[in-house]
Amino acid sequence: MSEQSQFDAAGDQLPAAEDEGAETRQAERVNLLGLPREQLEAFCSALGSRPFRARQLMSWVYKRGCGRFEDMTDLARDFRARLSARAELAVPDILQRQQAADGTCKWLLSAGNGQAFEMVYIPESDRGTLCISSQVGCALDCSFCSTAQQGFNRNLSSAEIVGQVWLANRELGFQPGGERIITNVVLMGMGEPLANYRQVLPALRIFLDDLGFDLSRRRVTLSTSGLVPQIYRLAQDINVALAVSLHAPDDALRSRLVPINRLHPIAELLEACWHYIDEQNGRSVTFEYVMLDGVNDSAEQARALARLLAGHPAKVNLIPFNPFPGSPYRRSSDDVVQRFRDVLIRAGVHATVRRTRGDEIDAACGQLVGRVHDRTLVRLGSRLAAAARSTQNAATRTGA
Ligand code: SAH
């Protein structure tokens, strides 16, 4: 198997531990938080009930935030008993809560076996954004991200992904029929969501379903470091807002910052992005660009970035670098960030600067670490570098 296909299949290969766990749970109880509408209907049928019971169940779970079958009083008593025997509504245990002065909240959540992941709520005047995780750790090895330093442990299940939103609603005091507290969900916490495609897709369906969290497709954002084949797959499967971690205007630099670029270089990645927008009738892709002092923040680099994006459905979101212990980078100064933004805007590229939130509790972008026992044997960056070296050697040997 080539490096590329090995990695692209990683989302299907890595979660051995989790899949075993899921099977064991299946034999015991099915966690209904992981089942999108059709699967929940099939589950109700299998329990000998009518599929429309799934609608009632969803209304209790997602509209009213109810987590106990015995409280779902308009369901027949024997159906509730069968549900209690065969199903559960389980959310991750909270290990720690923290709140920053600006109102940003961070929760450390248990993934079992001593592993933990994080989610963050960011309140703003006109919206409330929940930033959720898709994996315990991350295997992608981006050099400026503290999650990457922890390594990778396992994929989260769809129930653990959906469970974060359900739990945050409860924690934040959501009242049935009351105003929404979480208006936006972003998959920008720990992990690479497209490397956990099988579990992320059903969760996205539940976020969008009007019987689920009923969020509009513009208010659910998936952020990826650039797994090109999965962007094409996503374009076929579902319509959510897409954010892409670009971080550099040329392949040499991007490969250093975001190693997956060595498999899927910028031109291929952008092609996939424009395809996504065409297929989904979307507005634009948001390109995230972390501002690293003296690395990717020059006016020339801004012009190069503008040349890549001008005339395309693209927005740039500049993220001042959030430092973490041992990080080799410094944050660009505010003036430099401003200058970079101005160059983009003058070249006709829409650009904004992301305000840093919750950094005093390490809740800002790239600061989420959780508790991860690394199960990756070799870091992606070094694995790809070794693969590139051996290809070069082979080419030298054959005189290619
Ligand atoms: N794996 C996904 C989502 C996770 S991170 C992705 O790569 O897109 C969400 C955003 O925070 C990404 O754009 C990521 O590159 C950025 N980020 C990571 N570390 C950061 C840091 N130390 N400072 C600022 N942004 C960072």
Image (cartoon, grey):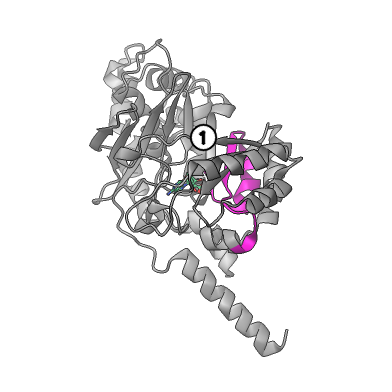
Binning the other alpha carbons within 10 Å of mark 1 as few (below 14), some (14 to 19) or many (20 upward) gives: many
- Seen in the picture, residue 95 relative to 41 is either above or below; the reply is below
The reply to whether the magenta stretch includes residue 211 is no
- Seen in the picture, residue 267 relative to 209 is either above or below; the reply is below
Q: Measuring from the top left, give residue 65's x and y in whole percent.
A: 35, 20
Quarter that holds the N terminus: bottom right
Quadrant of residue 360 within the rendered picture: top left
* Residue lying farthest to the front in this orientation: 335
Q: Amino acid at mark 1?
A: Leu
Query: Which residue position holds label 1?
Result: 204
**Looking at this view, is 154 or 365 the one in front?**
365
Bounds of the magenta span?
Answer: 223-252
Residue 176 horizontal side relative to residue 37, left or right = left
**Looking at this view, is 148 or 102 the one in front?**
102
Residue 32 in sight in this render: no
The reply to whether the magenta stretch includes residue 237 is yes
Q: Measuring from the top left, give residue 324's x and y in whole percent.
A: 35, 51
Residue 82 horizontal side relative to residue 193, left or right = left
Quadrant of residue 98 within the rendered picture: top left
Q: Measuring from the top left, give residue 173's x and y in whole percent.
A: 31, 18
Which residue shows up at 48% across the image and 49% down it? 192
Which residue shows up at 39% across the image and 11% down it? 178
Quarter that holds the C terminus: bottom right
**Looking at this view, is 279 or 322 the one in front?**
322
